[in-house]
Structure formats: C-alpha cells, structure tokens
Image (tube, helix red, strand yellow):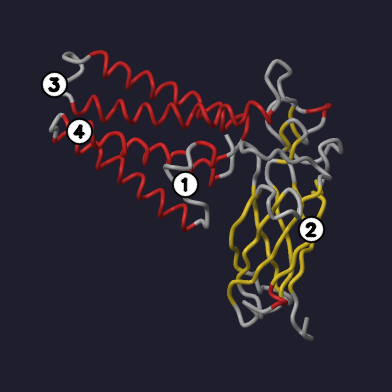
Amino acid sequence: MPVGRLLEIAQVSSEPPYVAGLPVQLYVVGRASNHFTRVRVTVRATSDPASGVIASGEVNTDFTNDPGVIVFPFSPVGGVHILACNQTVHVRFEAVAGSGAGDADGIVEDTRPILCKPSPASGGGSGGGTTSGGNGGGWDWPSWLPPPSQLCPMLGRSFTATLMGALIAAITAASLPGGPAQHPVAWGAMTTLFGLALAAWWAWNTLCQPNICLRLGTICWACKSAVLVGIPIAGSLMSVRGGLAVLIVGGVAGGLVATLRQRFCRVPTISGGLGQFGF
C-alpha cells in the first residue's frame, strides 16, 4: 500500500448484554486514511467465498480523528448464524468511495476472533432477565427451551408465516361484502392470526433479539407475499374495499423497501421464501 494510505481491520468485538452466554450485538472496527471514505464490510463464517454471509453492509469512515475509524455494527442472533465469544470470523473491507476506491489496496480481508469485553463470565456489564452465575453480564437461557440455534429460527419463521396469513385474511375479509356479522369465520380468522403473529413477534424479539434488518425484512416479505395473493382475491370478488386493503399493505411494503435500502439491508424477494432469512 502506498505511503499515507491505510485500510485495516482492527478487531471484532462485543459487549453486554449476553443471551445464554452468546453475544447479541457485535462490532467490526477498523481504521482508514481519507482515501477510503466509505467501506463495504462483509462478515463470513470462514474465508471460503461459498460460506454463508453472516452480515454485510456499507458504512462511512468517521474522520473525527486521524486516521479515520470504521465501525460496522451487526447482530447475528435470530438468524441462521449463532456466534460465540472467541469464535473466529472472516472479515472483508472493500472501499466503495474515496480516491482509493477501486484500487487493489482498497480491499483487505482477514480473520479475527470475537472479543467479548467483558466476557459473559467476568461479571461486567448489565443484562436483562436472570443473571448468569450471579453476575450482570447476561442471563441464563431457560433450560426447558430448545437452544437458541433451534428456537430463534423457528420463532422467526412462525412470526413471518403467521403475519403473512393474517394479512391475507385481512384482505379476504375486507373483500367480502358486509362485515363481521355476515362473515364471522373470515373476520375471526384474521383476528386470531394477528394475535398469534403478535405473540410470536414478542417471543422472537424478547428471547432472540434479531437485528433490525431481519425484523424489517420479515415484515416486508410478509406484506409483499400478501399483496401477491390478495390481488386475485380482491379482483375476483370485484371489491373496492379489498383493493384498498391491497393498496395499504402494498404501501407498507414499499415503505419498508425504502427503509431497508436506506439502512443498507438486503431487500427480501418473494421468490426467496423464508430460506433467505436463514429460517
């Protein structure tokens, strides 16, 4: 790398709270000179390009100090990848803006262990729920529940599928002539499904603390899928009210797509199914 140009990966770290001894919020930290003003960060399980991407996104370099600092926050809990303290991950930096973008020295990659500071067993920090080992560094995962690697994807899948069903039921109920008195089954199914979706949402967020990209992405996918199913339902019944319901759900989906792009999150596709979330 030419003199005066710097792009390096410093560390991958985490801090309390810890859930069942597992890090919830992690940070990739690096340094860069002013030749690299924006960096795409990719975190993988291994250096093999075929290995799954744990997290990916773009961040601006903070030049409050010299050299600039790169901080990329991510959270794997709730998805397919469950990471542990001291586990090694592969990190790749690729400059996407600045005078050094596109140059060979604008790409660096290396492996780093996850540094938990303080560690779950050290007694530092504060967490929610029952503390582990008498310290405030986290809380014990209930022994009667499946492990997070099994339960969290199941809860995320249950919420997403139930929300999609509730939205389809809402469009169907709105498309039918009359109200709840004339169609108690349709309106009752809609109410029940929304209640189940809310319960699954609460359990998933409380126990697994999925990252914001995953939370918004699942809602977006459910809305888009409901619109795809709802259009022929409202059309076949020639219902203006049903068409309005489709437009409302579609508007929510459009707003979520814009938010996901603003946050540099992956926008889910209908064809990708639940597998694109790691469920």
Dot 2 lies on which element?
Answer: strand
* Residue 235 x, y percent position in the rendering: 17, 35
Q: Which residue is mark 2?
A: 11
Between marks 1 and 4, how big is the CA–CA gap? 24 Å
* Residue 218 x, y percent position in the rendering: 48, 39
**Dots 1 and 4: beta carbons under 8 Å?**
no
Dot 4 lies on which element?
Answer: helix
Q: Residue 176 vs residue 129: left or right? A: left
The residue located at (79%, 28%) in the rendering is 132
The amino acid on which the numbered mark 3 sits, given as a three-letter code, is: Gly
Q: Give 142 or 79, whichever is nearer the viewer.
A: 79
Density class for disc 4 (Cα within 10 Å; few <14, some 14-19, many ≥20) is many
Mark closer to the chain start, 2 or 3: 2
Q: Which mark is residue 234?
A: 4
Q: Residue 85 vs residue 264: left or right? A: right
Q: Is residue 47 above or below residue 269?
A: below
Between marks 1 and 3, how big is the CA–CA gap? 35 Å
Q: Is residue 41 above or below residue 185?
A: below
Res 82 → quadrant: top right
Where, quadrant-wise, is the N terminus in this rendering? bottom right
The amino acid on which the numbered mark 1 sits, given as a three-letter code, is: Pro
Mark closer to the chain start, 2 or 1: 2
**Dots 4 and 2: beta carbons under 8 Å?**
no
Dot 3 lies on which element?
Answer: loop
* Residue 24 x, y percent position in the rendering: 68, 41
Q: Which residue is mark 1?
A: 268
- Which mark lies nearer to you, 3 or 4? 4
The residue located at (73%, 48%) in the rendering is 45
Mark closer to the chain start, 4 or 2: 2
The amino acid on which the numbered mark 2 sits, given as a three-letter code, is: Gln
